[in-house]
Amino acid sequence: ASLASSAMPSSGGVKLGSGSSGATTDTDSGTASGAESDFAKVELPPAPAADSADATRIMFQMPDVPAGAEKKLTRYFNKSDLVEVVFKFVEETSRTYSAGRGFDIKGGFPPKSLRGKLKSTIADADLC
């Protein structure tokens, strides 16, 4: 099973969701069931105010969600936040229906994994 997403520039941020510009959140890689989360030590900071100069909006479209779960999510991040914070947000948000399944987020076209950019800022990873 996989969660598809794409990184497409949009006004004030990036859309991570299904589409041809392709980012894929791959749930078959990463943490095995029962293992400590890849992002257990990453702190998810509070979302900045939408009008903050450092804020960028990232929209997520989460396929493969069970009935009743939110398929589209929007969250503001600081452009200076690390990419690992985005991974932490996806992990926390999908925990109730994908516990124990690892994932990867891919962005751009052709889609490339963002795992190699975990310590890059959101701005440096071109996610805003």
Image (cartoon, rainbow, N blue to C red):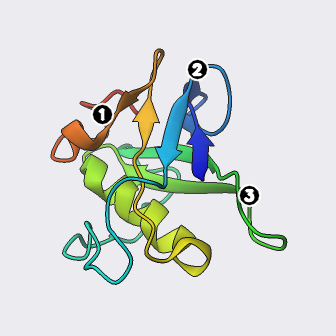
Callout 1: SS: loop
Label 3 and label 1: CA atoms lie apart by 25 Å
Residue sitting at 62 percent across and 75 percent down? Answer: 97
User: Is residue 10 visible from the viewing direction of this image?
Assistant: yes
Residue 33 higher or lower than 56, as above or below: below
Residue 10 higher or lower than 116, as above or below: above
Q: What amino acid type is highlighted by mark number 3?
A: Lys
Residue 113 at x, y = what percent? 34, 34
Residue 75 at x, y = what percent? 54, 57
Q: Which residue is mark 3?
A: 71
Quadrant where the C terminus sits is top left
Q: Mark 2 or 1, which is nearer the eye?
A: 2
Q: Foreground residue, 14 or 4? A: 4
Callout 3: SS: loop
Q: What amino acid type is highlighted by mark number 2?
A: Ser
Q: Foreground residue, 18 or 74? A: 18
User: Is residue 128 visible from the viewing direction of this image?
Assistant: no
Q: Which residue is mark 1?
A: 123
Label 3 packing within 10 angstroms: few (<14), some (14-19), many (20+): some
Identity of the residue furthest to the right in this view: 67
Check whether the beta carbons of the residues at disc 3 and disc 1 lie within 8 A of each other: no
Residue 11 at x, y = what percent? 61, 29
Label located before the other in sequence (2 or 3)? 2
State the mark number for residue 21: 2
**Residue 33 appears left or right of 20:** left
